Image (cartoon, rainbow, N blue to C red):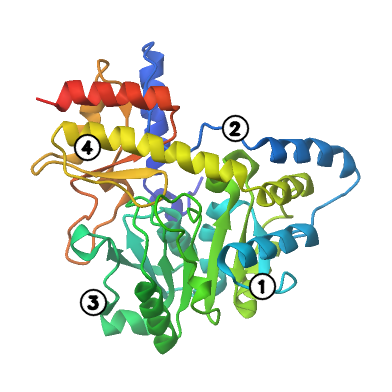
Amino acid sequence: MHIAERIRTLGAYAFAEVDRRVDRLKAKGIDPIDFGVGDPTDPAPVVARNACREAVETRARAGYPPYIGTADFREAAAAWMQGRFGVALDPEHEVSSTAGSKEAVFHLPLAFLDPGDTALVPTPGYPPYQRGTRFAGGNVHFLPLVPENGFLPDLDAVPGAVLEKARVLWINYPNSPTGRVAPPSFFERALKLCREHDILLASDEAYSETYFTEPPRSVLEFGREGVLAVFSLSKRSAMTTYRIGWVCGDGDAVAAFRKVKTNLDSGTPTFIQDAAVAALSDETHVEAMRESYRQKRDILAEAFRDAGFPESLPEATLYIWQRLPDGMDAVDFCKELLDPEVAVVATPGPWISDAASDGSNPGEGFARFALVPPIERVEEAAARIRKRFGG
């Protein structure tokens, strides 16, 4: 049996490997504290669960869902964008439902890249940015996110020859995993670059509602032409299992994405969309989750400070991108955390980073902690970290 080269040459998905490490600990009778995969352990909000239960009955004879989302869902997403960012969208032409953000990110390059075209991709970053590009036959030019540049890509450093072939620029703010919030000047610079070189600006804004200072801005506040923004209910409302989100922005770009989507799936179940409409109408649960993440962030960050690690307090997202002491290897550090006396799971930075053009990997010297365990487990992990690394 012939296996396609794109599969044969595909490395392990980082978070699947994290899950395997967790399973190995559990097989030994150890209950690890799992900061590895960013899957919230909080339940989806009651308002969404109740709406989903009701919709299962009211949609019993609904048949296939609309490929691009129900009118109710698209209108709710547009209304939420207006209320949150002051961005007015036409739900008929400028919004499309998605099966969460991962589906949108992975499939988007199929609409905008021909074989041999290039996508500009941040590293560290969400693996589907580059994997979706490669499955579409495109090339990847990595933009390293390093502390010296405030974890913002240096757009001025992209070679002219790369820009000539570039068709998509991925940005992600609030940023996973660094926790950085981008200033307005960055969005303005990215828009200028993309318009000068006829590049689609694709902005993954799945973490827009998990923040600890001022509410982050959307790229769509700065411009819409040649821009797509990706949103999800996974992190905002702990609805990871529901697989629901949306893409919005430039109507022509949304139309191109929709054409891909209608050939790939048959739409998100309508009862899931109804649950999402209910979730978007409620901000109370979002505020409560934001405060919970703030508490967990502060508990873990304080433990690392007490243990002598560099300050790495994030401005947003549900991650701590913990910088390690000089000379400490990220993979070795995460292996030490797996010692049964510590039993804490984290993701080594190099696993979610790719080497830049100079050969350096910006994930070296970092480890990612997803703040998803319950607060009492975070406190327990903090105590173990202090004990093991506090000297």
Depicted 262 relative to depicted 255: above or below: above
Locate residue 64 relative to residue 91 in the image: left or right.
right
Which numbered marker is on residue 191? none
Which amino acid, by three-letter code, is at mark 4? Val
User: Which of pointers 3 and 2 lies earlier in the amino acid sequence?
Assistant: 2
User: Which of pointers 2 and 4 lies earlier in the amino acid sequence?
Assistant: 2
- Residue drawn 48% across the image and 71% down it: 219
Q: Do the residues labelled 4 and 3 touch (CB within 8 Å)?
A: no
Depicted 160 relative to depicted 185: above or below: below
- CA gap, disc 1 to disc 2? 30 Å
Which label sits in the foreground, 4 or 3? 3
- Residue drawn 25% across the image and 21% down it: 384
Which numbered marker is on residue 43? 2
Which amino acid, by three-letter code, is at mark 2? Pro
Q: Position of residue 19 (x, y in %)?
A: 42, 31
Closer to the camera, 326 or 380?
Answer: 380
Closer to the camera, 177 or 26?
Answer: 177
- CA gap, disc 3 to disc 2? 43 Å
Find disc 3 in the rendering and name its residue. Answer: 157
- CA gap, disc 3 to disc 1? 33 Å
- Indicate the secondary structure of the residue bearing disc 4: helix
Q: Give the quadrant of residue 181.
A: bottom left
Find disc 1 in the rendering and name its residue. Answer: 89
Q: Give the quadrant of residue 187.
A: bottom left
Which amino acid, by three-letter code, is at mark 3? Ala
Find disc 4 in the rendering and name its residue. Answer: 331
User: Which of pointers 4 and 1 lies earlier in the amino acid sequence?
Assistant: 1
- Indicate the secondary structure of the residue bearing disc 1: loop
Which label sits in the foreground, 3 or 1? 1
